[in-house]
Image (tube, helix red, strand yellow):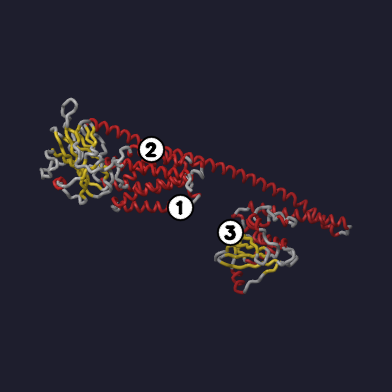
C-alpha cells in the first residue's frame, strides 16, 4: 500500500505531465503564416513562421524558396535533427499611431548563439507565394551588417540587421544549421529596446553566475579546510551545473569559440553526463541510503559513474546528436529517483525532512528543461528564467543543509570520542583498582592458605575440621578469582609489540596447557592422530606466546572437567586449510541455547551451574588470547551429548 509521500510524488508527476500537455501549443494546420504588422518596439514572431527541414543541408536559397513550408503555430524546437532548418517569416512594415511609418531598421534576435550557423535573407515581397525564381537577396551573417552604434555588446544570440526601407510586406528567410534542441525564437526589436533587454538579461545572468561562483568557492574552501568529501562533491556539482548553463545559454561559446558551436554542444552534454553520478552520490549520502540497501546503492553508483564516463567518451567521439537526448532522459530519471528516495526515507528518518525542501526548487523547472532538451516538442517561455532562480535557491539550500548535516555529524563524532575517552579512562581506572586489589590480596591469601594447610594436617575434631575445610575451599575460590583478574589485567595492558612470539608446535601448546592444568584425575584423554596427520602436525608451527596459548587451552580443559565431573574429556588436534584446530569435548549437560550468545561476556555463568566454582572469566580470557594471535574460538553442542570447544590458530607460513 502506497504511503502518503509516494502518493504526493505520483500526484506531482501527473500534475507536471498535465501542465506540460497544457503548455504544449495546439497545432492547428494554418493555411499560411500570418502577416505580422510591425507596430511596437518588440515583435515576437512565434505563430508567424513556417518551416522546411533540409536533412542533407545542401539546398540553396533558391531551392529552399521553392519548397512547401509547414506553418508553425509557436516557436520551433529543433529536436536533435541533424541538418538545416529553413524558417520563413512574413512581416509588414506598418505606420505608428501618429500615422508616420515605423523606423526602417530593425534588429532580428534569434537564439541560438551559433553566429556562423545562422544566415538571413530579407526579400521585399510582391506576390509572396508565387514560387518564382527571383534574384537572391544579399545574405548576411549575424552581426555582420549591424552598425557599431546599434550593435549590442556581448549579446549571446544571433543578431541581424533587418532594413525595411519602404512600407509594405517583406519575407525573412532564416537558415539554421542544427543538431541540438535549442528553440528558434525570433524577435524583431528596435535597437534601443533590444539594447535595454540585453542589459537586463546580462545583469540577471551576471547576478546568477556571481552567486553561483560564490557558492561553488564556498563549498570548495569548506571541502579543503574541513576535509569532508561531501563538500568537494558539492563544489564539483555546482561547477558542472554552472558550466552547463553557461555553455547552453550561449555565453561560453560567444566568449571563447563562437566559430565552433558543436564544441559547445559536446561540452554541455559532457557536463550533464558527469552531473548525473555526482548528483546521485551527494543525495545518496545525505539520505543515508546505504544504511537500508548498501549493496544496491554501491552497485547503482558504480553503474552511474561507468555510464557517465562512457557517455563522455562517446561525446568526444562525435556522437553528440545520438547521445545527447539519452543523457537528458537519464538526468530526468535521476531527478525522479532521488525525489522518490527522499519521500521514502523521510518518514523513516524525520531528521532528513530538509532534503525534499532542497530538491523542490530544482524539480519542476529542471524536469521541464530536461524534457525540452530531450526532444519533447513544447516551449514554455518562463522555463529558463525559473530554472536559473530554482538552481540558485537549490544550491544555497543544499550548501546550507550539507553544512548543517556535517556539523551535526562532527558534533556526534566528537561527543562519541569524548565518551570513548572517558570510558577508556574509567576502564583503566577500574583495571588499575582490580590489579592493585588483586596484588594486595595475594600475600594475605597466601598466608591464610599456608595456615589452613598446616591446620588441616593436625588432628582436629569433626566440627573444627569441617570449618577448616570450608575455609580452605573459600581461600581456594578467592585464589582462583584473583588469578583470573590478574590474567585479564595482563592481557588488557599487553600491546602486540610486547608479546613474545615463538614458533610453536601443537604438542608444545598441549603440553603447556596440561602443565598449567595440573589435573590429577587423569580424565583428559588425547585422541592420537593417524601417522600421516601426525607428521603434518610435527612440521606445522604456530607463531605465539606459549604461556598465553597454554592458558587459553587450559581454560577449555578446566571448563570441560568442571561441567563433566565423571566422564572423560577428549582432546584432539588437526591441521586443515592453513589452520590448526584444538578440539575439547566433554559428556556433560551441554550448552544452553538461550545463554550461548553471552558465554564470552565477562562474569557470565550459566544459571544451572552457579554452584560450581568459577567467576565467568575463563572463556572471555581464552577468546581474547586467541584473537590476539589471529585465531578464533567456537562453542557448540555435540550430537551425542556434551559440549565441544574448538580453538583455531593460523599456521606460520614457511
Q: Residues within 10 Å of mark 2 (few under 14, many from 20)?
A: many
Give the vertical position of 571 relative to 335 (above or below). below
Image quadrant assignment for residue 51: top left
Q: CA distance from mark 1 to mark 3?
A: 30 Å
Q: How many marks?
A: 3
Instruction: Depth check: give the residue in front, 379 or 202.
Output: 379
Q: Which residue is mark 2?
A: 392
Looking at the rendered structure, the secondary structure element under dot 2 is helix
Going from the N terminus, do you reach mark 2 or mark 1 first?
A: 1
Q: Is there CB contact under 8 Å for labels 3 and 2?
A: no
Residue 405 seen in this snapshot:
yes
Residue 420 at what x, y percent from top left? 59, 45
**Lower position in the chain sequence, tag 3 or tag 2:** 2
Q: Which mark is residue 630?
A: 3
**How crowded is the residue under tag 1: few (<14 C-alpha within 10 Å), some, or many (20+)?**
some
Instruction: Please give the label number shown on residue 298.
Output: 1
**Marks 2/1: CA distance?**
29 Å
Instruction: Return the x and y of residue 157 as percentages of the image width and height.
Output: 25, 39
Amino acid at each position: 500500500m502506497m504511503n502518503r509521500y509516494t502518493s504526493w510524488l505520483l500526484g506531482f508527476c501527473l500534475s507536471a505531465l498535465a501542465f506540460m500537455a497544457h503548455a504544449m501549443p495546439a497545432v492547428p494546420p494554418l493555411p499560411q503564416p500570418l502577416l505580422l504588422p510591425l507596430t511596437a518596439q518588440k515583435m515576437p514572431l512565434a505563430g508567424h513562421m513556417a518551416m522546411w527541414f533540409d536533412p542533407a543541408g545542401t539546398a540553396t536559397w533558391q531551392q529552399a524558396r521553392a519548397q512547401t513550408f509547414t506553418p508553425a503555430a509557436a516557436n520551433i524546437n529543433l529536436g536533435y535533427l541533424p541538418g538545416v532548418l529553413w524558417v520563413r517569416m512574413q512581416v509588414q512594415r506598418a505606420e505608428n499611431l501618429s500615422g508616420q511609418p515605423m523606423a526602417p531598421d530593425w534588429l532580428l534576435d534569434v537564439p541560438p548563439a551559433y553566429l556562423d550557423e545562422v544566415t538571413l535573407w530579407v526579400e521585399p515581397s510582391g506576390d509572396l507565394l508565387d514560387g518564382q525564381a527571383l534574384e537572391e537577396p544579399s545574405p548576411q551573417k549575424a552581426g555582420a551588417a549591424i552598425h557599431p552604434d546599434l550593435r549590442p555588446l556581448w549579446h549571446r544570440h544571433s543578431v541581424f540587421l533587418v532594413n525595411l526601407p519602404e512600407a509594405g510586406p517583406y519575407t525573412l528567410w532564416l537558415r539554421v544549421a542544427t543538431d541540438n534542441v535549442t528553440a528558434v525564437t525570433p524577435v524583431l526589436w528596435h535597437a534601443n529596446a533590444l539594447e535595454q533587454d540585453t542589459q537586463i538579461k546580462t545583469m540577471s545572468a551576471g547576478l546568477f553566475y556571481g552567486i553561483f561562483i560564490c557558492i561553488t568557492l564556498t563549498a570548495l574552501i569548506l571541502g579543503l579546510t574541513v576535509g569532508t568529501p561531501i563538500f568537494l562533491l558539492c563544489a564539483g556539482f555546482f561547477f558542472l551545473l554552472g558550466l552547463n548553463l553557461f555553455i547552453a545559454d550561449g555565453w561560453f561559446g560567444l566568449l571563447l569559440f563562437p566559430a565552433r558551436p558543436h564544441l559547445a554542444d559536446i561540452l554541455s552534454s559532457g557536463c550533464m553526463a558527469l552531473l548525473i553520478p555526482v548528483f546521485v552520490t551527494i543525495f545518496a549520502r545525505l539520505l543515508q541510503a546505504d544504511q537500508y540497501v548498501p549493496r544496491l546503492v554501491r552497485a547503482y553508483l558504480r553503474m552511474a559513474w561507468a555510464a557517465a564516463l562512457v557517455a563522455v567518451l562517446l561525446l568526444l567521439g562525435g556522437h553528440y546528436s545520438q547521445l545527447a537526448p539519452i543523457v537528458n532522459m537519464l538526468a530526468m530519471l535521476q531527478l525522479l529517483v532521488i525525489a522518490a528516495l527522499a519521500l521514502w526515507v523521510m518518514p523513516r528518518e524525520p531528521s532528513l525532512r530538509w532534503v525534499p525542501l532542497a530538491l523542490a526548487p530544482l524539480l519542476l523547472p529542471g524536469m521541464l528543461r530536461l524534457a525540452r532538451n530531450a526532444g519533447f516538442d513544447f516551449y514554455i517561455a518562463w522555463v529558463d528564467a525559473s530554472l536559473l532562480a530554482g538552481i540558485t535557491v537549490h544550491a544555497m539550500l543544499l550548501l546550507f543543509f550539507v553544512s548543517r548535516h556535517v556539523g551535526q555529524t562532527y558534533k556526534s563524532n566528537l561527543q562519541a570520542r569524548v565518551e570513548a575517552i572517558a570510558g577508556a579512562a574509567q576502564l583503566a581506572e577500574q583495571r588499575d583498582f582490580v590489579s592493585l586489589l588483586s596484588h594486595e590480596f595475594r600475600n594475605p591469601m597466601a598466608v591464610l592458605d599456608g595456615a589452613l594447610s598446616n591446620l588441616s594436617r593436625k588432628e582436629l575434631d569433626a566440627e573444627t575440621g569441617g570449618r577448616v575445610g570450608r575455609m580452605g575451599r573459600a581461600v581456594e575460590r578467592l585464589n582462583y578469582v584473583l588469578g583470573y583478574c590478574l590474567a585479564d589485567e595482563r592481557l588488557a595492558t599487553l600491546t602486540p609489540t610486547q608479546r613474545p612470539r615463538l614458533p610453536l608446535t601443537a604438542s608444545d601448546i598441549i603440553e603447556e596447557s596440561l602443565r598449567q592444568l595440573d589435573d590429577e584425575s587423569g580424565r583428559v584423554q588425547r585422541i592420537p592422530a593417524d601417522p600421516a596427520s601426525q607428521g603434518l602436525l610435527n612440521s606445522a608451527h604456530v607463531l605465539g606466546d606459549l604461556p598465553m596459548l597454554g592458558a587459553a587451552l587450559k581454560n577449555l580443559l578446566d571448563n570441560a572437567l568442571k561441567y563433566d565431573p565423571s566422564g572423560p574429556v577428549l582432546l584432539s588436534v588437526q591441521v586443515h586449510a592453513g589452520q590448526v584446530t584444538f578440539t575439547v569435548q566433554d559428556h556433560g549437560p551441554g550448552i544452553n541455547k538461550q545463554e550461548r550468545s553471552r558465554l564470552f561476556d565477562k562474569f557470565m555463568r550459566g544459571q544451572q551451574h552457579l554452584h560450581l566454582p568459577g567467576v565467568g572469566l575463563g572463556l572471555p580470557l581464552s577468546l581474547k588470547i586467541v584473537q590476539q594471535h589471529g585465531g578464533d574460538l567456537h562453542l557448540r553442542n555435540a550430537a551425542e551429548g556434551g559440549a565441544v570447544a574448538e580453538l583455531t590458530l593460523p599456521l606460520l607460513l614457511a
